[in-house]
Image (cartoon, rainbow, N blue to C red):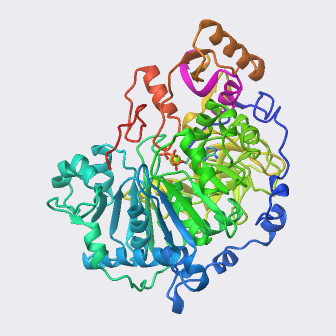
C-alpha cells in the first residue's frame, strides 16, 4: 500500500497524548506466577531462538513422513500415560458437556478422516464447516487435517450470500453443518454450488438425519474405522483456508500450510505461556483464525486441556466458566473485555477466579485502560498481542517476563523480524530511527505465513516487497523495541497537516467514565483535509446530552491538543463491528458521508438472530 507520509507531519510520540504518557509500565507479571514463564528473558530468548529448534519440539510423522498438524496436536499425545489426559472439553449452550481425552480424540478424528476417505475426498480438497461450536466441528477440523484435505471453517451466523461466495471461492467439496443451518441457509443455494458434492449433517436432537442430498455424520462415523494412518505430509502441503474479518473490505481467503504448526506451538508456549496442566480457554470461534490457531491447535500441540463454549458472550456465564473449569490461561478480545468493563470490576468479585494465571487479548488495539482494568478485576493485567489471519499466529506480544507498557502490542516473537517501513513503487525504506510512524512489515520466512490469497494471486503479490510482508497496519517502535499500533493504513486520518491514527484518540475518550466504546474517523474537509469525528457508545446508566458532548470534546482538547482532538462527537447505542468483534470504521465513514456501505458480509447485527442448531 502506498502512502505519502512526506506531505504530512507525523506527530512526535507522546506529544499528543494519551497512549504513551500517563500509564506507568506494569512490571513483569510472570514474577508472581506459580510457575516460571516459558520465556524467561526476552533478549536471551531472541538471541538463541531458531525455527529449527522450535520445529524440534514437535515429533514429525513416524518414519520421517513429514509434518502434519493433527499428528502434532493429537496423535503424538495419545500414547502412554498422556493418552488419558483431558484434551478437549466442549461446553454446550444447554445440555451436556462433552469431554475427550487425547486417546478419544485420536480415535474420533481417525473416524472422521476415514469418512472423508470413503466419500472419495482427496488430498488438497476443501472441506468446509458451517457449524456452531459443537464437538463435531473440532473433530472435523482435526480429521480433515489428518486426511490432508484443506479445512475451511465459516462462522455459522453468516447469511446465505457470504456463505455462497466463500463456498464458491474455495470450490468446497464437502460441507459439515447442522440440519437447521442446512435447511435455512444451504439448501436454497445448493443448485448454485456444483462443486459441493457432500453435505454432512450434525443432527440436533439425536434423531437420525433424513434430509435429501445429505449424509448423517453420526451414521458415517459409527461405521468408519477408528484406525487411520496419516499419509506423508509435506510441511508445505495446504492445510487451512481462513477468511479475514472483512474490517477493511471484502474478506480474503488466506491459505496456510501444515508447517504453520511450528508457529502455533511455539507461540502458544512463549506468548501464551502454556504449561503442562494448564486449562486454556480461547473464546474465539474457529470461523476466525484465532479460534483455530489457538482455539484448537496450539493448546493441543502443547498437550494441555482446551475449553470450548458453544454459547456467545454472556458475562455471568463467562465468569462462571472460568470459576468452574479452573481456567488458568484465558485468551479473549478487546470487545469482550470492554463488555466486562461496562459491567464493572465488582461483577467479577462474586466469582472465584483465582485459577487464572495469564490473560491475553488479540484482535483490536487494547486500550491502556483495559490492560490496567484486568488488574482491578482479576488481579492480572491483560497481555495484548498482535497478529493477522495472514500471519497465522502471534507475531508481537507482551510476554509475562517482560514489563507491559499499557497501550503497546509488545515486542516481536523471537524468530520474528518486525520493522517499521515505508514503501513506494520503486523502493522500500526500513526506518531504523525509533518512534517514527510507518507500515508494520515482517521479514518473510516464518512457518505460519500465508501462502496465498485464494484465487487472488496479484493481491497476494502486492503484499510483498524486498523480502518483507507488508501488513497494512501502521505502527511505531519505541527505543526499547516495543511496538505501538497507530491504526490500519485505511483508517488513518489526515488533518491540518498531521497524520493521526484513530486508536490514540479513541483511547483518550475511553478514559471518560461514561464512555464504553469509541470509534474515530476522518471526515473530508476543504480546509484541513479531514476533520476528526468520533462516535461514542455510553456505558449503562449514562445518557447522552449536550453537556456530555462538550465534556468529551474538552477532554479530547486537553489530552490531545486542539489540532487532532475530535471536533465532532455523535452518540450511538452501539458501534458497528465485525463478527470477530472489530469496529468497522469504514462503515461509520460510509454512513456519515452517505456512500455505499460496501461489503458488510461480516457485520455483526446488534441483536444477533438466535441460531437453531
Ligand atoms: P480485513 O483484512 O478483511 O480487513 P481484518 O484485518 O480485521 O480484516 P483479521 O486478520 O481478523 O482481519 O485481523 C487482523 C487485524 O486486526 C490486524 O491487521 C490489525 O489491524 C488488527 N489487530 C489484531 N490484533 C491487534 C492488536 N493487538 N492491536 C491492534 N490491532 C490489532
Ligand atoms: Mg486484514
Instruction: Specify the farthest residue to the bottom.
Output: 63
Residue 435 position in % (x across, y down): 78, 42
The spot of residue 15 in percent (x, y) is: 81, 29
Q: Is residue 27 left or right of residue 236?
A: right
Q: Is residue 392 visible?
A: no
User: Magenta segment: does it hold 507?
Assistant: yes
Seen from the viewer's position, the closer of residues 203 and 238 is: 203
Kindly identify the residue that appears in the image at 27 percent across and 45 percent down: 160
Number of marks? 0
**What residue do we see at 82% from left, 33% from top?**
21
Q: Is residue 224 left or right of residue 540?
A: left
Residue in front for this viewpoint, 302 or 483 = 302
In the picture as drawn, the residue positioned furthest to the top comes out as 546
* Residue at 39 percent of width and 84 percent of height: 228
Q: Is residue 160 visible?
A: yes
Residue 59, compared with residue 521, is above or below; it is: below
Q: Is residue 9 above or below residue 358?
A: above
Q: Which residues are magenta?
A: 502-526
192 in the magenta segment: no
Tell me where residue 568 sits by quadrant: top right
Amino acid at each position: 500500500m502506498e502512502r505519502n507520509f512526506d506531505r504530512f507531519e507525523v506527530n512526535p510520540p507522546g506529544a499528543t497524548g494519551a497512549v504513551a504518557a500517563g500509564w506507568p509500565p506494569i512490571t513483569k507479571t510472570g514474577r508472581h506466577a506459580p510457575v516460571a514463564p516459558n520465556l524467561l528473558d526476552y533478549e536471551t530468548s531472541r538471541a538463541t531462538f531458531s525455527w529449527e529448534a522450535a520445529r524440534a519440539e514437535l515429533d514429525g510423522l513416524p518414519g520421517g513422513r513429514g509434518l502434519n498438524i493433527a499428528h502434532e496436536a493429537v496423535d503424538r499425545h495419545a500414547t502412554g500415560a498422556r493418552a488419558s489426559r483431558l484434551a478437549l472439553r466442549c461446553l454446550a449452550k444447554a445440555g451436556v458437556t462433552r469431554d475427550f481425552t487425547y486417546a478419544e480424540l485420536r480415535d474420533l478424528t481417525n473416524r472422521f478422516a476415514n469418512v472423508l476417505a470413503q466419500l472419495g475426498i482427496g488430498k488438497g480438497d476443501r472441506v468446509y464447516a458451517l457449524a456452531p461450536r459443537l464437538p463435531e466441528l473440532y473433530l472435523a477440523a482435526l480429521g480433515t487435517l489428518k486426511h490432508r484435505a484443506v479445512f475451511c471453517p465459516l462462522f455459522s451466523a453468516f447469511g446465505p450470500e457470504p456463505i455462497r461466495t466463500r463456498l464458491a471461492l474455495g470450490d468446497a467439496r464437502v460441507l459439515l453443518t447442522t440440519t437447521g443451518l442446512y435447511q435455512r441457509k444451504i439448501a436454497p443455494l445448493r443448485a448454485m454450488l456444483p462443486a459441493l458434492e457432500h453435505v454432512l449433517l450434525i443432527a440436533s436432537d439425536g434423531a437420525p438425519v433424513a434430509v435429501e442430498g445429505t449424509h448423517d455424520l453420526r451414521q458415517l462415523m459409527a461405521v468408519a474405522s477408528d484406525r487411520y494412518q496419516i499419509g506423508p505430509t509435506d510441511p508445505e502441503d495446504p492445510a487451512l483456508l481462513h477468511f479475514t474479518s472483512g474490517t477493511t473490505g471484502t474478506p480474503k481467503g488466506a491459505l496456510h500450510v501444515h508447517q504453520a504448526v511450528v508457529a502455533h506451538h511455539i507461540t502458544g508456549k512463549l506468548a501464551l505461556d502454556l504449561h503442562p496442566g494448564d486449562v486454556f480457554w480461547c473464546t474465539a470461534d474457529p470461523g476466525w483464525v484465532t479460534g483455530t490457531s489457538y482455539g484448537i491447535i496450539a493448546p493441543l500441540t502443547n498437550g494441555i486441556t482446551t475449553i470450548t463454549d458453544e454459547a456467545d458472550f454472556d458475562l455471568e456465564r463467562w465468569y462462571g466458566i472460568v470459576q468452574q473449569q479452573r481456567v488458568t490461561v484465558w485468551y479473549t478480545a478487546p470487545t469482550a473485555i470492554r463488555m466486562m468493563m461496562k459491567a464493572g470490576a465488582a461483577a467479577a468479585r462474586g466469582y472465584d477466579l483465582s485459577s487464572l494465571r495469564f490473560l491475553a487479548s488479540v484482535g483490536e488495539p487494547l486500550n491502556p485502560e483495559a490492560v490496567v482494568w484486568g488488574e482491578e478485576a482479576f488481579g492480572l493485567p491483560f497481555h495484548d498481542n498482535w497478529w493477522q489471519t495472514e500471519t497465522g499466529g502471534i507475531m508481537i506480544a507482551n510476554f509475562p517476563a517482560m514489563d507491559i507498557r499499557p497501550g503497546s502490542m509488545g515486542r516481536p516473537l523471537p524468530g520474528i523480524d518486525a520493522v517499521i517501513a515505508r514503501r513506494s513503487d520503486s523502493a522500500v525504506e526500513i526506518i531504523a530511527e525509533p518512534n517514527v510512524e510507518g507500515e508494520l512489515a515482517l521479514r518473510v520466512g516464518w512457518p505460519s505465513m500465508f501462502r496465498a490469497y485464494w484465487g487472488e494471486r496479484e493481491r497476494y503479490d502486492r503484499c510483498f516487497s524486498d523480502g518483507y510482508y507488508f501488513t497494512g497496519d501502521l505502527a511505531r517502535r519505541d527505543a526499547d523495541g516495543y511496538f505501538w499500533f497507530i491504526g490500519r493504513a485505511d483508517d488513518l486520518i489526515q488533518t491540518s497537516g498531521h497524520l493521526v491514527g484513530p486508536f490514540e484518540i479513541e483511547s483518550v475518550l475511553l478514559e471518560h467514565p461514561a464512555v464504553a466504546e469509541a470509534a474515530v474517523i476522518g471526515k473530508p474537509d476543504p480546509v484541513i483535509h479531514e476533520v476528526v469525528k468520533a462516535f461514542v457508545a455510553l456505558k449503562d446508566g449514562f445518557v447522552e446530552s449536550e453537556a456530555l458532548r462538550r465534556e468529551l470534546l474538552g477532554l479530547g482538547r486537553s489530552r490531545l491538543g486542539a489540532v487532532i482532538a475530535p471536533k465532532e462527537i455523535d452518540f450511538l447505542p452501539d458501534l458497528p463491528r465485525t463478527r470477530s468483534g472489530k469496529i468497522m470504521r469504514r462503515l461509520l465513514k460510509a454512513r456519515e458521508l452517505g456512500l455505499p456501505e460496501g461489503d458488510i458480509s461480516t457485520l455483526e447485527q446488534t441483536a444477533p438472530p438466535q441460531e437453531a442448531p
